[in-house]
Amino acid sequence: MNQSNILENRFPGRRAALKREILEQALLCFNDLGVEATTIDAIKARCDTSVGAIYHHFGNKEGILSALFFAAMDDQRQQLERELAGANNLREAVFCIIESYLDWVAANREWARFLYQARSPLAKGPFQQELKDRNIQNYQKLKEQLIGLGKGDIKIVQPFEMLFSLIIGPSENYCRAWLSGRVKTSPQEYRKEFAESAWRSLKR
Amino acid sequence: MNQSNILENRFPGRRAALKREILEQALLCFNDLGVEATTIDAIKARCDTSVGAIYHHFGNKEGILSALFFAAMDDQRQQLERELAGANNLREAVFCIIESYLDWVAANREWARFLYQARSPLAKGPFQQELKDRNIQNYQKLKEQLIGLGKGDIKIVQPFEMLFSLIIGPSENYCRAWLSGRVKTSPQEYRKEFAESAWRSLKR
DNA sequence: TCTTAAAAAGAAGGATATTCTGTTTCGGAC
DNA sequence: GTCCGAAACAGAATATCCTTCTTTTTAAGA
C-alpha cells in the first residue's frame, strides 16, 4: 500500500510509464517546493524528459495537479468504502470513517500532504466544477449511508450540518499538524481516542 | 469590526493609504482568482498604481501574501486573547476559544478564506521560519494558559497532543465547509453546539 | 510491411515576476 | 519659507517561466 500503487492502479501498463514517472516526480516537487514554486522545468529535469511530453500527457501545469489530486482523492475514498461496508450501526460507521482516514494519511504521507495543499489552487481553476461535483456526490453518498445506519441507533441530537465536521474535524486537524511537524506522534496511535472522542461529541 | 479595520490597525495613517489599498485589492484578487492566478498587473490595475509602488512596499508577490497573512493571524489572535482573559476554568477557556474562533470567521469572511488558502504557499517560501516561530509561540502560550486553568478542574484524559485538535478541529472544518458553500448555516449559529461538543469530547 | 495514431522532443512565442533607473513627494532642520 | 534627505512612486527593461507549435520517433494493428 505504498504511494506508487496509487499511480499503478490509475495508470497501469508499460505505455503509461512516463506518465506515472512525471506524476511521481511532480508530487515530490509540489511537496518540497510548493505548488506555485514548482516549475515545469524542475519536473522535466527530475524525470529526464521534455516539455513536449509533459504537455502531451497533461495539457498544462494544472492538469498535472488535478491528475494527482483526483488519484489521491479516489484512493482515499475507495479505502473508506471498503471498510465502511462492514459497519452495522452508526457507531461502527463513525469509527470506520475516522480510523480509515487516519490509516490512509499515515500510509500515504506524501499524498496526504499534497491533498491538503492542492485543494485551494484546484478550487479556482478549470477543475473547479469537477471538484465540486465529486465533493457533493461523496458527501451525499456518505450521508445516505449514515442515515441508513442511524435508523435503529442512538439518536444524534446535533444539527445534521455539523455531523461531518464533528466526525472528521479533529482527525483532520491533527493530521495537518502532524504533517507539518507541530505534533510528533503518528495519528495512527490515537485511532481509538479520536474515534471515541468523536462519538462522545455527537451525543447529547 | 469590518475587514478594513484590520488594515487600519496595522498600517495606520495617511501615508500608508496606498499600502492599505494595495493589500485590500490583493486580498480580493487572491480570493477571487486564487493565489497563483493573481498577477501583479491585476492588482496594479485594481488600485490604479504602478508595479514600482507595489515592489517598493512589499518586495515581491510573497511579500504581499505574508503581509496579509500575518495581519489576519494577529487580529484573530488578539481577539482570542482579549476574550480568553475572562476565563476562570478550563471549561470556560474551551468555550472561549471556540466561540472566539467562530465569531472571527463569521465577521471576517474574506480574511478567513484567505488564511485557509495562503498558509500552504507561505509555509514553503522565505517566510517559512517566521510562520513556524509564530505558530510555536502561539501554541506554547495557549498551552500554558490552559494548563494553568486546568489545575483545579476536571481532569482531561486525552493525550495532550490531541487537545487543540479536539477543541478547534470541528469548528475549523465547519468554517472551511461554510466558506466553500458546502454548508449554508453561519458557524455563529452553532457556537454553543460546537463548544459543548468539544467539551464533551475531551472528557472520558 | 505498411498505416496511422500516439508519444516524445525541443525551438519559438507570449505572459508574468522582478529589477533598475529616474522622478516626485513629503517631513523635518534651519 | 527654503533646503535636504529619505521615502514614495512611475514605468521601461530584463529575466523567468508557461504554453504552443512543428517535427521526429515509436509502437500497435491491419
Image (cartoon, coloured by chain):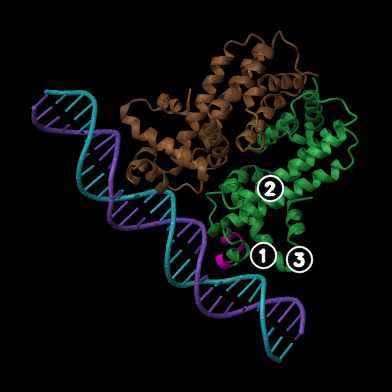
Chain colours: A green, B brown, C cyan, D purple
Counting residues from the start of the chain, the first of labels 1 and 3 encountered is: 3
Residue at image mark 2: A133
Q: Do discs 2 and 1 belong to a common subunit?
A: yes
- Report the residue at 91% width, 30% height from top: A152
Magenta segment boundaries in residue numbering = A44-52
Residue B162, how many percent across, how many down?
72, 27
Residue B191's image quarter?
top right
Residue B51, how many percent across, how many down?
35, 46
Marked residue chain, label 2: A
Q: Do discs 3 and 2 belong to a common subunit?
A: yes
Marked residue chain, label 3: A
Residue A119 in sight here: yes
Mark number displayed over residue A77: none
Residue at image mark 3: A13
Residue type of the residue flagged with mark 3: Gly
- Residue B19 is one of the magenta-drawn residues: no
Residue A166 in sight here: no
Secondary structure at numbered mark 2: helix
Considering depth in this image, is A200 or B28 the residue closer to the camera?
A: B28
Residue B44 appears left or right of B146: left
Residue type of the residue flagged with mark 1: Leu
Considering depth in this image, is B112 or A71 the residue closer to the camera?
A: B112
Residue at image mark 1: A18
Q: Mark 3 or mark 2: which is in front?
A: 2
| Label 3 packing within 10 angstroms: few (<14), some (14-19), many (20+) | few
